[in-house]
Amino acid sequence: MNRAEQIDQDAPLYNLSIHAKKRASQRGISKKIIELIQIYGEEAPSSHGCVIKFIPKKELGFIYSDLTKDEQKMLKDKVNTYIVESDGFVITTGHRYKKIIKH
């Protein structure tokens, strides 16, 4: 069973705030990318108790085995995307330009 199958299928993965929906739209980040980051992403602490989730480039090979060709291409094009979560709720999304430091 792959990691995506282990997630409860009834639980909504992309609980987006109004701000996150607006930023995702402005930045061309689809709900599918957000969902993939939530499933496969690594976490790094952020300020005010939030968590940054992203997919490190070194992990792409492992993740690709679980994805369809279309999902692989979509993820490859958006590999620098991150989300900021608090209690499972996506606060914002963006594209990283600097390395995210995990503590």
Image (cartoon, helix red, strand yellow):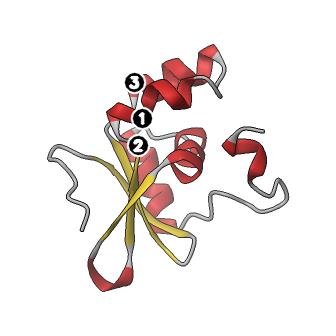
The amino acid at mark 2 is Ile
User: Does 4 sit left or right of 94 as displayed?
Assistant: right
Residue at horizontal 50 percent and vertical 24 percent from the top: 74
Q: How far across and how far down the image is residue 80, in percent?
A: 31, 38
- The dot on residue 59 is 1
Q: How far across and how far down the image is residue 9, in percent?
A: 82, 53
Q: How far across and how far down the image is residue 10, in percent?
A: 85, 59
Residue at horizontal 67 percent and vertical 44 percent from the top: 3
Q: Earlier in the sequence, mark 3 or mark 1?
A: 1
Q: Closer to the camera, 24 or 73?
A: 73
- The dot on residue 55 is 2
Q: How far across and how far down the image is residue 17, in percent?
A: 52, 69
Where 63 sits versus 55, above or below?
Answer: above
Which mark's residue is nearer the viewer, 3 or 1? Answer: 1
Which residue in the protein does label 3 denote? 77
Q: Closer to the camera, 8 or 48?
A: 8
